[in-house]
Structures are given as structure tokens and as C-alpha cells.
Image: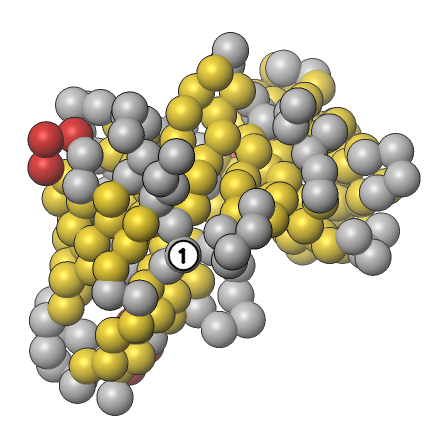
Amino acid sequence: KNQVEQSPQSLIILEGKNCTLQCNYTVSPFSNLRWYKQDTGRGPVSLTIMTFSENTKSNGRYTATLDADTKQSSLHITASQLSDSASYICVVKRHSGAGSYQLTFGKGTKLSVIP
Amino acid sequence: GAGVSQSPSNKVTEKGKDVELRCDPISGHTALYWYRQSLGQGLEFLIYFQGNSAPDKSGLPSDRFSAERTGGSVSTLTIQRTQQEDSAVYLCASSLVWQGQETQYFGPGTRLLVL
């Protein structure tokens, strides 16, 4: 069954600290994995996208890693800011033939950055 | 069963004209999303419908963009006074939440070219 599991479910950290969010998946065949940031009441905004051959990718203070062998990804946030408070969603894409595909969303990690 | 269908599959229009893009979601899916994907870019969230709730329009890039979902099923994305930068693939997805896990099913998209 195609699943995406994220941990922790929620996280509270002090401003300026680093944190790492985890994503494990069983989606197959794997196409790519994307991390989204979603502010409350807003649509998701893509942070990074990683394909099978990529191990790490950075976007400012966000660094994503991917281990396609163990089917694990992480999102590391450096020097957190109050504006980082949001839900972080891991999304895995699989092709389902004839040009169509599916995205399986994790339930997200709710991050709260406090002063 | 039938997946998400979109029409037209391709649309070429002149700058300044209005266009309507149609999405037929999977029957029974309560959530419907519109995304845009420009050449070489990731998915850009546009608008999200969930049941009878007010749609999340936070991703619409300008007031030239609007969308409706009639009867909780078919959706139409309208772009008024099209500009060349509107050229992209417009993707529609409907989703099903099962045991807390959301899976989005994407249609093949409408490729829009504004001349």
C-alpha cells in the first residue's frame, strides 16, 4: 500500500534553534519527493523536490535529504525563525501509467517556533 | 474506474482573450485542487475546494484568475485577459482521504499557450 508517514506529528522549538523533520514512504514506483510548507489556512508552497538520484538539496535555511534505498527523507531547518511556524508536508509522487500520476501526502508535521 | 479528466488538453489563445479550463474529478472525491506548472518549475498551488466550504483562493496569482465548482463536482478555472506569462500546464486534482491519509489523483492537464 502506498503510504507516507511523517514524524514527529508536532514540534515546538525555540527561535534560532535547528530541527529535523522525518518522512518515510512506501510509495512505489517512486518518481519524486517534495516537501511543502503550508501556513494555516493557506495552500501548500513547495520547498524542495528530489528525484531518485538526488541525496540532498538546499533552499535557503531548508535542507532536504533523500535515501531512496531506505525510502526515507528528512527536512532540516537551520536557525529557525518565527515565520517558520507552519505545517510541513512530505509528498511522494508515483506514476500510474498513461501520463497520469498520483501524489500521496503525509499528514504533516506541525512546527511551532516560539521566541 | 474513470480518473480525473480535463479539457481541453491543449489551448492556444491570443493575449488578452479569456479562457476556460474544465476539470471533472473522480466521483465521490470531495476535495478538488487546481495547480499550475510552468516550464521547468514545480507545481504552484492555485485554489482548493473542499466540500461546501469556501474555497482557499490564496494561490491565485491575480484577480484575472477565478474558479468555480458547481454542485460539488465539475470545476472551471477561468483566466481573463490572458498574458504570455499565463502559458503553463494547468493541472487539476481530486482527493480522497482514507484513514487520515490523503491521496491526490491528478488529471492529464491542460497545456495553455498564450501568444
Amino acid on which disc 1 is placed: Pro
Question: Please, is residue A77 above or below residue B108 in the view?
Answer: above
User: Is any atom of residue B41 visible in this view?
Assistant: yes
Residue at x 71% of width, y 44% of height: A30
Tell me if B37 is positioned left or right of B10 in this view: right
User: Residue B3: percent from the left, percent from the top?
Assistant: 38, 41
Label 1: how many residues lie within 10 Å, few (<14), some (14-19) or many (20+)?
many
Residue sitting nearer the eye, B4 or A39:
B4
Q: Residue at x 57, y 46 (%)?
A: A96
Residue A104 x, y percent position in the rendering? 56, 33
For label 1, the SS is loop
From the viewer's side, name the closer residue of A36 and B34: B34
* Residue A114 percent coordinates (x, y): 58, 21
The answer to whether one can see residue A84 in this image is: no
**In terms of image quadrants, where is residue B37?**
bottom left
Give the residue drawn at x 67%, y 49%.
A32
For the residue pair B63 and A100, the one nearer the viewer reads as A100
Q: Position of residue A55 (x, y in %)?
A: 85, 51
Q: What residue is shown with label 1?
A: B108
The extreme right residue here reads A69
